[in-house]
Amino acid sequence: SAFEPASPAWRNRPSAGLDAVPGSSRQFSAGLRFAVPASILGSFEVDESSSGREPTFLLAAKVSASRFLGIARDAGAKWVLVSMDLAKIREAAERVAGSVGVEIVDVEWKVGKQRLLRVYVDRPPSPGQRIGSGVSHSDCEAVSEQLSVILDVEDLVPGGGYVLEVSSPGLDRKLLKLSDYDKFSGRLARVWLNEPVGNAKYFEGRLAGCAGGVVQLSVRDRMISFPYENIRKANLVVEF
């Protein structure tokens, strides 16, 4: 095999020499190998900027110089905006997740130096547990492999090359659902509000659950309460 797990980051690394069907192969950072259609041939890289998010798999699809930043050149050499339907992409991801035994936490589409589709997955808790056991490398591999094929076949990411990233939510995961505030009760969190509570729109404290749509946060031995609908964004804080 041509795979050499030495470099800290893989970027557009050729995947020749892997065991795969003729004309199609893909390589990723964990050193695992599998075959996919040549139409979505790409390479993998390690994203070391993701705080606590492991494992992470990135599919860097091939892209021509005439496509960039979510703007594509059509057959008539005109530049056109490319629209994304995240609802359809999430539905496809949910289908894959159900077959793998994981759940979709969030789906993000970002455009910068590259077009990035990021999918966060987690393993649901077993009966009697509040928090799941977390996802493995094989879980992310399976989701990445199956979802990339569906995205290609159903043409859900138009406009040329993009990067597909599948990873765990990380230790600093976002709190996206009301149930998350019960699920992670006792954990340190940062919360930003739309409307101030006590002249403040930002709090850092320990989650104390929620009841009737009202979230409780313990801040310096003082209990702060605010409606879930008033939360602009929130995430857990990594503690060591």
Image (cartoon, rainbow, N blue to C red):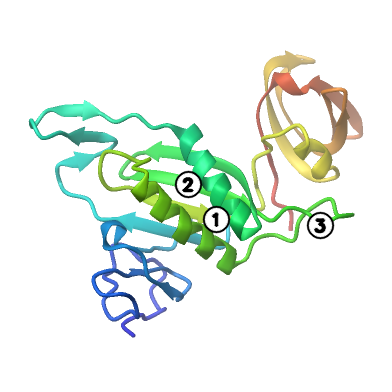
Q: Which of 194 and 100 is in front in this view?
A: 100
Question: Label 1 sits on what residue type?
Answer: Ser
Q: Along the horizontal axis of the image, is 167 left or right of 216?
A: left
**Residue 112 location in percent, x, y?**
34, 39
At label 2, counting other C-alpha atoms closer than 10 Å, the crowd grade (few under 14, some 14-19, many 20 or more) is some
**Marked residue nearer the N-terminal end (3 or 1):** 3
Residue at numbered disc 2: 118
At label 1, counting other C-alpha atoms closer than 10 Å, the crowd grade (few under 14, some 14-19, many 20 or more) is many
Distance Cα–Cα, label 3 vs label 1: 20 Å
Q: Do the residues labelled 1 and 2 touch (CB within 8 Å)?
A: yes
Q: Nearer the viewer, residue 45 or 89?
A: 89
- Residue in the picture at 37% in, 51% down: 163
Residue at numbered disc 3: 126
Q: Along the horizontal axis of the image, is 56 left or right of 102?
A: left
- Residue in the picture at 78% in, 54% down: 125
- Residue 65 seen by the camera: yes
Give the quadrant of the C terminus. bottom right
Residue at numbered disc 1: 167
Q: Which of 219 and 28 is in front in this view?
A: 28
Secondary element type, mark 2: strand
- Residue in the picture at 8% in, 32% down: 77
Distance Cα–Cα, label 1 vs label 2: 8 Å
Nearer the observer: mark 3 or 2; the answer is 3
**Marked residue nearer the N-terminal end (3 or 2):** 2
